[in-house]
């Protein structure tokens, strides 16, 4: 069973669309949204069972040029 996580990304000014395009090309996400507030993008992604969540996100997402900051929210149970 995979782990569902939400990742919010703050991008450098003028880089949001480029970052979104790079994420889409990597096909790592389930859903990707543009958001208002402190962060520019929000992804819903599933980390495969047995994978380290932090390493998975770091290796497959956070090396994209233009990402300034991230916030990851782990999920535990759906109601």
Image (cartoon, rainbow, N blue to C red):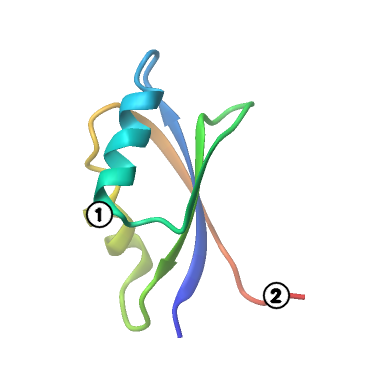
Q: Which residue is mark 2?
A: 78
Is 41 left or right of 27, judged from the image as shown? Answer: right
Image coords of residue 10 (percent x, y): 45, 30
Count neighbours of disc 2 (C-alpha within 10 A) and say few if under 14, some if 14 to 19, many if 20 or more: few
Q: Residue at x 33, y 44 (%)?
A: 24
Instruction: Tell me the element at label 1.
Output: helix
Q: Residue 27's x, y, as percent?
A: 30, 55
Q: Quadrant of residue 16?
A: top left
Check the image and report above or below for 72 versus 52.
above
Count of numbered marks: 2
Whichever of labels 1 and 2 marks the residue nearer the N terminus, that label is: 1
Q: Farthest residue to the right: give it.
A: 79
Q: Residue at x 37, y 82 (%)?
A: 49
The residue identified by callout 1 is 60
State which quarter of the image contains the N terminus: bottom left
Tell me which residue sits at (27%, 38%) in the image: 22
Identify which residue, 54 or 45, lies in the foreground: 45
Q: Secondary structure at mark 2?
A: loop
Above or below — where is 37 with respect to 78? above
The residue located at (59%, 32%) in the rendering is 35
Classify residue 37 as left or right of residue 5. right
**Left or right placement of residue 66 versus residue 72 in this view:** left
Mark 1 residue crowding within 10 angstroms, few (<14) / some (14–19) / many (20+) = few
């Amino acid at each position: 069973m995979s782990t569902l996580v939400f990742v919010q990304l703050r991008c450098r000014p003028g880089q949001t669309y480029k970052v979104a395009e790079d994420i889409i090309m990597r096909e790592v996400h389930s859903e990707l949204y543009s958001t208002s507030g402190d962060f520019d993008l929000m992804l819903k992604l599933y980390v495969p069972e047995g994978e380290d969540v932090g390493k998975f996100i770091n290796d497959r997402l956070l090396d994209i040029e233009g990402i300034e900051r991230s916030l990851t929210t782990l999920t535990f149970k759906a109601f």
